[in-house]
């Protein structure tokens, strides 16, 4: 096989160009700090880097969703704090309204104060989330979720909560109906109601009552002792005679052990683990009933009733006391419900901090995996670059020397 001088020179140029390309690639890797710049550089490492990059993207999306939830929770906590302050003021106003020395005009003034507080509560319930929605809009509301209708404040949103797109459930809204319109009625376990033939002119009143024996209460008000707890009814009737006033308590229409018991104003009446007191002078036709609590109590309805009652003149002292007692009990129930919601919001905010820490840790791990897959070991890279540079320079000098040689130069020598 004949090898010409030109072939030798061309082969030398090809090798020089190859070394030059390798040197340029090493220089590019040193400049970028990346060992894998294309999938062809290391397919397996490129696949690991791509998976890590996808994980980083997911963590960034989770962080944005968490930030949105945290913002909503912060605003909700502030709104509930404002609501608690307003309701505390309403409670103090109701306590003042129970003062027996107050005139009808003074109570009407207190009713106006309650109306102002009620309007401020409505504003808090319709507070926006800063992004076009409403904190208490439930699963979505384009308009303020609470509407002051003729029959009272109504919820026009969608019940339920929106959840942030996270592995762990985090809220993006709050169920307004449950927060403002569905507190347990009465004292939270049972409620006392007035059954009076002459509303506004009653001569006695009943307090909110309490549970003194939880075991006995639940045993007496739950199946199988009671077929339908939702309709369970305890009724207190009074009999006024020459020998004094007595009372009898019936349970779903059936007589109980408390039959024809002498009545003493303010003395506790106890039955089935419940205790309550009737005060004043019961008249013929006055009666009371006890029913189990239901999640139907609206803070706005409570204030509306109190406003109407305090603004109504010529009410008896007993009727005023009964109205104030009922309003205070319901306000306390609504406050407890909102405070419970506020506690859950605080717990969610604490959980958000934990989730943020987890997201941060997973993102750091993904970044480390991406770096391990594609980043260049700078010490190794510099060493390789220096070796390639030295080899290229040596090859360049050798070629420069060899290319000046020919057959004539050999003959002359």
Image: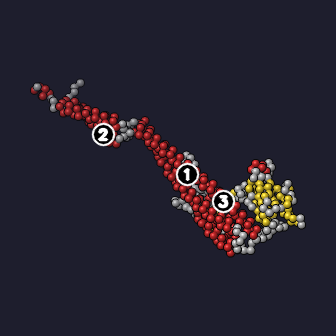
Task: In the rendered view, tell whether residue 341 sits above or below residue 97.
Answer: above
In percent of width and height, residue 257 lies at 85, 54
Q: Nearer the viewer, residue 94 or 266?
A: 266
In percent of width and height, residue 362 lies at 49, 42
Which residue corresponds to the image point at 83% horizontal and 61% vertical from the top-left? Answer: 263
Q: How far is mark 3 from mark 1, CA to CA?
A: 23 Å
Query: Disc 3 or 1, which lies upstream in sequence?
Result: 3
Task: Work out which quarter of the rendered image holds the C terminus and state it.
Answer: top left
Which residue corresponds to the image point at 54% horizontal and 53% vertical from the top-left? Answer: 69
Q: Residues within 10 Å of mark 1 (few under 14, many from 20)?
A: many
- What residue is pinned by disc 1? 349
In percent of width and height, residue 320 lies at 73, 68
Q: Nearer the viewer, residue 386 or 71?
A: 71
Which quadrant of the figure has residue 110?
bottom right
- What residue is pinned by disc 3? 334
Can the viewer see residue 321? yes
- Residue positioned most to the left: 412
Q: Residues within 10 Å of mark 3 (few under 14, many from 20)?
A: many
Query: Disc 1 or 2, which lies upstream in sequence?
Result: 2
Which color scheme is applied? Answer: secondary structure
Q: Nearer the viewer, residue 106 or 127?
A: 106
Which of label 2 and label 3 is nearer to you? 3
- Residue positioned most to the right: 242
Query: Disc 2 or 3, which lies upstream in sequence?
Result: 2
Task: In the rendered view, tell whether residue 203 sits above or below residue 5.
Answer: below
**Proximity of marks 1 and 2: CB atoms separated by less than 8 Å:** no
- What residue is pinned by disc 2? 27
Q: Secondary structure at mark 1?
A: helix
Task: In the rendered view, tell whether residue 103 sits above or below residue 75.
Answer: below
Q: How far is mark 1 from mark 2, CA to CA?
A: 50 Å
Q: Secondary structure at mark 2?
A: helix
Which quadrant of the figure has residue 178?
bottom right
């Amino acid at each position: 096989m004949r090898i010409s001088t030109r072939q030798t020179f061309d082969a030398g140029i090809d090798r020089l160009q190859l070394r030059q390309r390798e040197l340029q690639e090493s220089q590019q890797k040193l400049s970028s700090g990346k060992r894998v710049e294309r999938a062809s550089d290391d397919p397996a490492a490129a696949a690991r880097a791509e998976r890590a990059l996808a994980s980083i993207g997911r963590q960034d999306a989770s962080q944005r969703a968490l930030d949105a939830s945290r913002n909503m929770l912060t605003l909700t906590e502030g709104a509930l704090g404002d609501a608690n302050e307003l309701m505390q003021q309403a409670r103090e106003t109701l306590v003042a309204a129970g003062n027996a020395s107050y005139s009808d005009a003074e109570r009407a003034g207190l009713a106006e104060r309650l109306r102002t507080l009620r309007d401020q509560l409505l504003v808090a319930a319709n507070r926006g989330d800063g992004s076009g929605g409403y904190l208490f809009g439930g699963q979505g509301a384009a308009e303020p979720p609470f509407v002051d209708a003729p029959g009272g404040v109504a919820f026009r949103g969608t019940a339920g909560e929106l959840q942030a797109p996270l592995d762990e459930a985090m809220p993006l809204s709050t169920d307004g109906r449950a927060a403002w319109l569905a507190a347990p009625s009465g004292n939270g376990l049972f409620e006392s109601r007035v059954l009076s033939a002459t509303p506004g002119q009653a001569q006695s009143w009943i307090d909110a009552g309490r549970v003194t024996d939880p075991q006995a209460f639940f045993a007496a008000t739950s199946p199988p002792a009671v077929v339908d707890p939702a309709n369970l009814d305890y009724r207190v009737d009074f009999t006024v005679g020459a020998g004094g006033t007595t009372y009898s308590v019936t349970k779903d229409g059936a007589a109980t052990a408390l039959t024809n018991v002498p009545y003493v104003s303010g003395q506790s009446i106890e039955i089935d683990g419940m205790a309550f007191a009737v005060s004043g002078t019961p008249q013929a036709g006055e009666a009371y009933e006890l029913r189990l609590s239901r999640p139907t109590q609206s803070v706005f309805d409570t204030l509306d009733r109190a406003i109407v009652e305090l603004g109504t003149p010529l009410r008896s002292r007993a009727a005023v006391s009964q109205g104030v007692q009922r309003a205070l009990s319901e306000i306390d129930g609504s406050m407890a419900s909102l405070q419970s919601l506020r506690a859950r919001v605080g717990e969610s905010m604490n959980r958000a901090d934990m989730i943020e820490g987890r997201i941060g840790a997973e993102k750091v791990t993904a970044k480390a995996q991406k770096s391990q897959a594609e980043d260049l070991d700078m010490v190794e890279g510099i060493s390789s670059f220096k070796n390639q540079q030295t080899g290229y320079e040596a090859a360049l000098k050798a070629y420069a020397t060899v290319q000046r040689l020919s057959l004539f130069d050999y003959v002359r020598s």
